[in-house]
Image: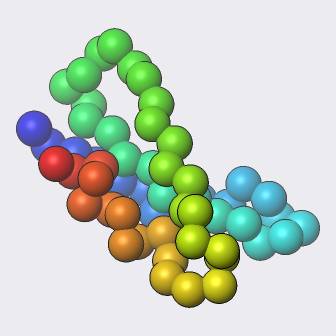
């Protein structure tokens, strides 16, 4: 499996909100998993769960 990624894609310019997305180009049946940080938004960052996307 070869996972590709695109990091820090801005989806809300006004609030400067960005996301990372990961995909395997060999998979044609597209699905999505949304990982929402549930830790109070004051500590950590979105990169802490990047290993989920590639395992």
Q: Residue furthest right?
A: 14
Q: Quick check: 30 above or below 11?
A: above
Q: Residue furthest bottom?
A: 43
Q: Residue at x 40, y 20 (%)?
A: 30
When asked about the image quadrant of residue 51, the answer is bottom left
Left or right of residue 2: residue 46: right
Q: Nearer the viewer, residue 38 or 4?
A: 38
Q: Quick check: 2 above or below 43?
A: above
Q: Quick check: 27 above or below 23?
A: above
Report x, y in % for residue 50: 33, 62
Report x, y in % for residue 54: 21, 50
Q: Residue furthest left?
A: 1
Q: Residue at x 16, y 48 (%)?
A: 55
Residue 55 visible in the current orientation: yes
Q: Nearer the viewer, residue 48 or 40?
A: 40
Residue 8 visible in the current orientation: no
């Amino acid at each position: 499996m070869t996972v590709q990624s695109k990091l820090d894609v801005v989806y809300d310019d006004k609030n400067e909100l960005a996301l990372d997305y990961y995909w395997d180009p060999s998979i044609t049946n597209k699905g999505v998993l949304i990982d929402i940080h549930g830790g109070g938004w004051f500590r950590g960052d979105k990169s802490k769960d990047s290993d989920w996307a590639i395992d």
